[in-house]
Amino acid sequence: MNKTGRNIIVVFLALFLLAGTFSGGLLVGWLIPSKTTLEGTLQTNLLATPTPSGQTDITKLFAPFWEAWQYIHDQYVDQPVNDTKLMQGAIRGMMDSLGDSHTAYMDPDEYKAMQAPLSGGDKYGGIGAYVDASGKYLTIVSPMINSPAESAGLFSGDEIIAVDGKDQTGIDPNVVLNTVKGEAGTVVTLTIFRPSTNSTFDAKVTRAVIAPDSVSGKMLDSGIAYIILPTFGDNTTDELKTTLTTLLAKNPKGVILDLRGNAGGYLKTGIEVVSQFVGSGVVVYEQESNGTMNSYNAIPGGLATKIPLVVLVNSGTASAAEITAGAIQDYKRGTIVGVTTYGKGSVQNWIPLQNDQGAVRITIAHWLTPNKRQINGIGLTPDDVVEYTADQIKNNVPDPQLKKAEEVILSQN
């Protein structure tokens, strides 16, 4: 038996079974494992301790694994084999077997690339799209307004399967994201798979300087306050409060909150945003793997908890934006108008492995609406389903979803 290789796997198994996690909301939570000496002590505890009744016998369970490991070292034609690569492959296979695209492994190089800081502070060079990096491929949630991604015709649901001709299969989407970003003015060729049409094509996109969008609002001719909320970032709550204060001073007939293309962000911000419209009660539940249900309540003192409200959503509305729309819908606080949302209702946690062996990303919880609806992979169905197609946008057809939202509010006055 190759003892070095076996010890590597044993150490990993001990780490995986003993490491704890905590939720960082909808974004990544971090855990730094203790610096305990694992080799020897944990091997003894894991493999030699008698197995309690009803629990898995690890020694027996992994007998076929070690048998296969030995056959590789004894009989594989190209020797010596790379034990580290075998170990990493075993981890990837274990993660894949769970059947959850959000649970994955990053090797040390991938993890290092994901952690690489971006220059330029709040601004960066990129294509201007909100993305989902928790699946098999980096997926467009929605292009930003007037962005290179929008100009290139990228849609919600588009999967980036290659970058500049390099296949991204098996590469963590967080790493792919850093590859897509780059210096403004440079061109990146993205190979896109579009599930809605089962088609694959190349899109040449010229990167630009991308700055985070802020909350904006105005009064419509109909006397209704219209607020666009593009993301759930650090400054979103303060910007929303400022916008609401300005518009409510004009005595609007109601408020339209536009969450179309909002890919979400911080759970904390989502709760704060909902609290501006929902005065009390549970905003969202978070259900852990052991069945534990954590609840997050609305924060008292919202500015717009009584005024007529409509929320606009589309297939690019995700994560914290879905939490907001889901809470407003469950409490019947307002009307949801648009099409079915993205359906991102799970929470992931990154756990760095000891000795710079990369990291694992594990789905640790699902979030539920106040009525305990599970929307992961399903999305929220609007109260009033109204399409706004790409052809309508291209042909400058007046926004039918916005028109419907105005009609709903005017009918309540």
Image: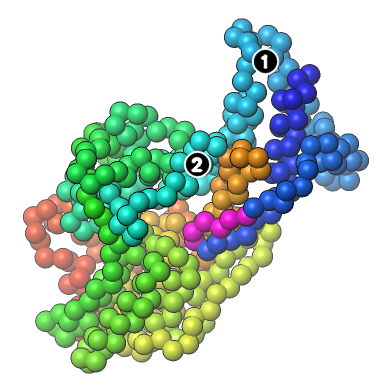
The kind of secondary structure the magenta stretch mainly shows is: loop
Query: Which image quadrant: the N terminus?
Result: top right
- For the residue pair 314 and 277, the one nearer the viewer reads as 277
Is 209 left, or right, of 276 in this rendering?
left
Q: Position of residue 102 (x, y in %)?
A: 51, 47
- Which residue matches tag 2? 112
What is the distance, in whole Å, between disc 2 and disc 1 at their CAs? 30 Å
Query: Residue sitting at 49 percent across and 81 percent down?
Result: 298
What residue type is disc 1 on? Ile
Which secondary structure lies at badge 2?
Answer: helix
- Which residue matches tag 1? 72
| Range drawn in magenta | 26-31
Which secondary structure lies at badge 1?
Answer: helix
Query: Residue sitting at 69 percent across and 54 percent down?
Result: 20
Query: Residue sitting at 72 percent across and 51 percent down?
Result: 34
Above or below for 65 versus 264? above
What residue type is disc 2 on? Lys
Query: Residue sitting at 22 percent across and 76 percent down?
Result: 217
Is 227 left, or right, of 361 in this rendering?
left
Above or below for 265 versus 239? above
Query: Which image quadrant: the C terminus?
Result: bottom left
Q: Is residue 30 within the magenta segment?
A: yes
Above or below for 161 versus 65? below
Q: How crowded is mark 2: few (under 14 residues within 10 Å), some or many (20 or more)?
A: some
Q: Residues within 10 Å of mark 1 (few under 14, many from 20)?
A: some
Q: Is residue 118 within the magenta segment?
A: no
Q: Where is residue 299 in the image (x, y as percent from the top left)?
A: 49, 83
